[in-house]
Amino acid sequence: MSINKNMRILVVDDFSTMRRIIKNILKQLGFTNVVDADDGTTAWEILNKDKIDFIISDWNMPKMSGIELLRKVRASEEFADIPFLMVTAEGQQENVIEAVQAGVSNYIVKPFTPETFEQKIKKIFEKKK
Amino acid sequence: MDIKLAKPFIEATVNVLSTMAMINPKAKKPYIKDHNRALGDVSGIVGFTANGGKKGVMSVSFSKKCAIQIVKNLLGDDIQNIVEDVQDAVGEITNMISGQARAKLAEMGITMEGATPTVIMGENHTITHITKDQIMAVPFTTEYGDFVVEFSMSE
């Protein structure tokens, strides 16, 4: 089974540079159905009015951080099963453990190459098969 | 200040810029900086904190030319407003260097949390290091111009 290239992807990062880098990589990989948000609060609003299939989120953001968004998503009945990729500059082991315990689907430490990004996405959807 | 502390910042800077912006900076010899004037036209600044009151500040100051090239390499044709894009990109680059450097500092037994970076633009701006301790500066050269990474840490 291949990954559905039409799935609706929500990219969350407070820096527009990183949102655009991620959207450019997704576009190169054939994913064009992408919406973005600049923090967890805005992402949560989008989740509640749009049908999101996959969340790619930064960790450190104002208002609601990525880890808070992840916990909120996993605790909800409606969104608990949405795959969640954390893309963060926080590379310390305790951050990775915290995200895994909160139910993250996969984790990328910035900086990353497009190849690493693709591999992480593939792993998430291979696990889901 | 222990010169060994420069290594995590140098490695993080080279890794971030070579991986994300296809720029391979060369570090020159670190030195102790004795003033607060920024050594570039645009600076990303981020504070570090740790349990027990330990604090630190890291900054990255780019020349205008170098900052613009980084944005071009990061975003390609997607540049919308060069001033806003430089500001945002320098913030994100600072954020990534901060994260990588702190991960390497943690391996040395120094665990610190990073704040959200701020970016200051303009000639002759200043960088305030909240600690009264020494400021270490590491100059870098690239084919697109120079930049400087600075950090200070309270004991």
Image (cartoon, rainbow, N blue to C red):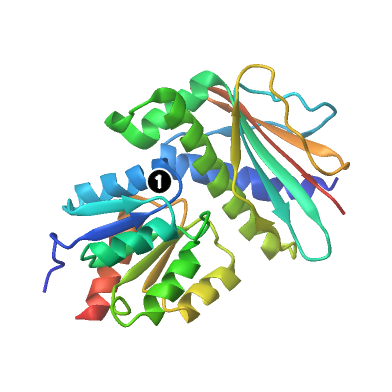
Q: Amino acid at mark 1?
A: Met
A90 versus B79 height, above or below: below
Which residue position holds label 1? Answer: A18
In the depicted structure, whether residue B51 falls above or below residue A22? below
On screen, residue B45 versus residue B87, left or right, reads: right
Q: Is residue B38 left or right of residue A38?
A: right
Judge left or right: residue A37 versus residue A25. right
Q: Residue furthest top?
A: B123
**Residue placed at 50% from the left, 31% from the top?**
B87
Name the residue at 53% across, 54% down. Answer: A62
- Residue A4 place in picture, x, y as percent: 13, 65
Position of the N terminus of chain B, as image quadrant, is top right
Q: For mark 1, give the secondary structure.
A: helix
Compared with B69, A32 (above or below) is: below
Q: Please state the horizontal and vertical placement of residue B27, each as a whole percent of the image.
A: 63, 34
Count of residue discs: 1
Q: Position of residue B150 (x, y in %)?
A: 71, 37
Q: Which part of the image, by quadrant, shows the C terminus of chain B?
A: bottom right
Chain containing mark 1? A
Label 1 Cα crowd, 10 Å radius (few <14 / some 14-19 / many 20+): many
Camera-nearest residue between B71 and A9: A9
Q: Is residue A19 visible?
A: yes
The answer to whether residue A56 shows anywhere in this view is no
> From the viewer's perspective, is A74 left or right of A110?
left
Q: Quadrant location of residue A41?
A: bottom left
In-front residue for pair B150/B44: B44
x and y percentages locating residue A10 in the rendered image: 29, 58
